[in-house]
Image (cartoon, helix red, strand yellow):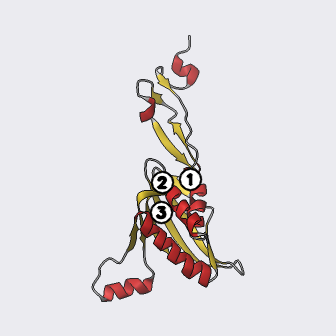
Amino acid sequence: MASAFMRTGRPTGWRTGAHSLPGIAGLRRASHDLVPSDLPREEIHVIEIDPQHLADRYMAQWTLADAAERRAAIERLWAEDGRHVLHPPAGIRQLAAELGFAHSTLEAHGYDAIEARVTRSHEQFVEKAGFTFRARADAVRLDDVVKFDWQTVSAETGDVLGGGLVMLVLDDDGRIKADYMFPGG
C-alpha cells in the first residue's frame, strides 16, 4: 500500500491552500506548496507579485500627467512610510565629494515627499524635455526584492536616451518600502 507521501508527493499532515488579494501590483496571496497542517492559515501566506507588472506600474507613475492620478498611483504602489533613494548623477556626486560629503544619496520619505519627487521629475523630464520612461522586460523577484532596468525614451522619436537600474524592496503587503534607483545604466 502506498504511503500518503507517495500518493501526493508530500508528507502526511501537510496541506495546500490558496487565497487571493487582488489589486496591489497585480498580486495575489498564495500558500507555500508544503505547509504543516497544524499552522494557522493566516501565518502561512506569502504575497506573490508579477515583477514585470510591478515594474511597469512603477515606471508609469513617473509619466502620469494628472496630479490626482499620480498621487493615487503612489498610494497604491508605496507603503505609507516608503523611501525612495537615488544614486545621484556624477556631477552631483562630484560636487558633494568636493564639499566633504563621503556619501551623496538623495532621499524622499513618505507619500508627500515621494509625490514631490515624482512630480518634479515629471515636470523636468516629461513635460519640458519630452521624455518618457519605461521598464525593460527583465524584471525579476528574489524574496522581497524586485530588480529591473529602465529606459529614458524620446517621446518624439522613440530613441532610447538613457536609463538605469531600480531595486524595490517590498513590505508584507507587497507595497514598496524602499526604492533604490541607479541612473546611468
What kind of element bears circle 1?
helix
Circle 2 packing at 10 Å, graded few (<14), some (14-19), many (20+), is many
Q: Residue at x 41, y 84 (%)?
A: 92
Which numbered tag is attached to residue 48?
A: none
Q: Residue at x 51, y 60 (%)?
A: 147
**Residue 114 visible from this viewpoint:** yes
- Give percent across and percent down for residue 184: 51, 77
Q: Residue at x 47, y 73 (%)?
A: 117
Circle 3 packing at 10 Å, graded few (<14), some (14-19), many (20+), is many
Is 146 rendered above or below residue 121?
above
Residue 181 is left or right of residue 123, and the answer is: left
Q: What is the C-alpha distance between the residues marked 3 and 1?
A: 15 Å
Q: What is the C-alpha distance between the residues marked 2 and 3?
A: 13 Å
Residue on which the image places disc 1: 25
Say what amino acid the circle numbered 1 marks: Ala
Circle 1 packing at 10 Å, graded few (<14), some (14-19), many (20+), is many
- Give percent across and percent down for residue 144: 45, 52
Closer-to-camera residue (139/117): 117
Q: Are marks 2 and 1 in contact (CB under 8 Å)?
A: yes
Q: State the residue lying farthest toward the top.
A: 1
What kind of element bears circle 2?
loop
Closer-to-camera residue (129/89): 129
Residue on which the image places disc 3: 167
Residue on which the image places disc 2: 175
Q: Are marks 2 and 3 in contact (CB under 8 Å)?
A: no
